[in-house]
Amino acid sequence: MSRSVVVTGASTGIGRACVDQLVRAGFTVWASVRTDEDEAALHRDHPEAVRVLRLDLTDPTSIEAAGELVRAAGPLHGLVNNAGVALPGPLEYLPVDVFRRQIEVNLVGQLAVTQAMLPALRLSRERGEDARIVMIGSIGGRIAGPMLGPYHASKFGLVGLTDSLRAELAPSGIRVVLIEPGAVATPIWGRGTAAADDLAKTLPAGAERYAKQIAATRANAARSAAHGIPPARAAQAVVRTLTAPRPRPRRVVGPDATVAAALVRLLPYRLLYRLAAR
Ligand SMILES: NC(=O)c1ccc[n+]([C@@H]2O[C@H](COP(=O)([O-])OP(=O)(O)OC[C@H]3O[C@@H](n4cnc5c(N)ncnc54)[C@H](OP(=O)(O)O)[C@@H]3O)[C@@H](O)[C@H]2O)c1
């Protein structure tokens, strides 16, 4: 029987690339999606090696049902907490419900899925095999710019959640790794811009004072969607993390993320924050 891995958010982008590469590497993959079309696409492309989970991170019942299915199937080698959204907007005017949704999906959801899958990961350890959790963070969890406050809050939060989880699970031999990509060319950028368009319709006149920063953020999103690294590059880092004998606890992915991580390490705060504001 091949080893199993759960990947959340497997319809598009990094999650879908992870599914494809994990199947190629010989894993059985539990892939989570939210629609019939995405479920059918996975069955079509991977009729043997993929089992589909229907899971919405904002719906605890669906997370528990997915956990039950996975736990009933036996030991789990890996969990890739990948699903996420980017909900941009100026914090001064951002409806608090939008902020709540961002945190619910990118942070609360990651913990809930982890709790649901941990018994199956522990089973793997009890049988003398490996068990690993991979969190898809972001370089946006190390440095924050304007207009993406909700997203940064979720990814900075994920760093703390991951660090605590790593420490708590170390005695059980379950490794916890944070992957921190820079710009990856996936639908998340277009989806974020669409969310910004929706939000713009509800913002009061005062939000005009952020027009320049909003325009710059849109231009940056378009650039990232066009010139970000392919999702397969990020997926490679995930597969390595799940297969290397001793994976690094944190792994930055992509040239822009590598430069940004170095700047965060080296620059004094005053200079760093001046750069980030641009
Ligand atoms: N792209 C980048 O530049 C970049 C950089 C750093 C980190 N990341 C992180 O990488 C991860 C994957 O993003 P991506 O770039 O591959 O974006 P993506 O193509 O938009 O994929 C996001 C995935 O998350 C799923 N998802 C969204 N909301 C969900 C919910 N409430 N419940 C369950 N699933 C949900 C989506 O499913 P639906 O199709 O059903 O909406 C989709 O499968 C995210 O955590 C993101 O923050 C991305």
Image (cartoon, rainbow, N blue to C red):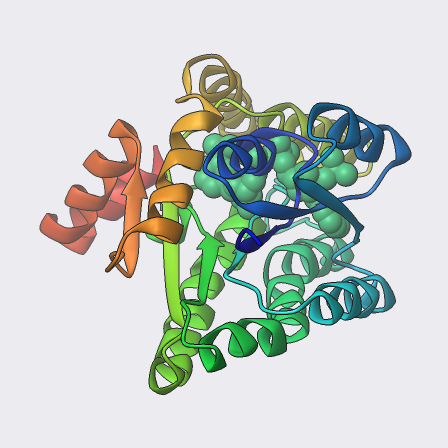
Position of residue 142 measured from the top left corner of the image (x, y, whole percent): 33, 52
Quarter of the rendering containing residue 12: top right
Position of residue 186 measured from the top left corner of the image (x, y, whole percent): 56, 25
In the displayed structure, does residue 247 sit left or right of residue 197? left
Position of residue 139 measured from the top left corner of the image (x, y, whole percent): 36, 44
Quarter of the rendering containing residue 1: bottom right
Q: Is residue 147 visible?
A: no
Q: Nearer the viewer, residue 197 or 169?
A: 169
The quadrant of the picture showing ligand 1 is top right
Q: Which residue does the image show at 79% across and 53% down from the upper left?
A: 56
Question: Is residue 158 placed above or below 44 in the rendered structure?
Answer: below
In the displayed structure, does residue 207 sit left or right of residue 126? right
Looking at the rendered structure, the number of numbered marks drawn on it comes to 0
Q: Is residue 178 visible?
A: yes
Q: Which residue does the image show at 52% across and 23% down from the upper left?
A: 221
Q: Which residue does the image show at 69% across and 41% down from the upper left?
A: 50
In the displayed structure, does residue 34 sit left or right of residue 274? right
Question: Which residue sits furthest front?
Answer: 1
Quarter of the rendering containing residue 227: top left
Q: Nearer the viewer, residue 144 or 259?
A: 259
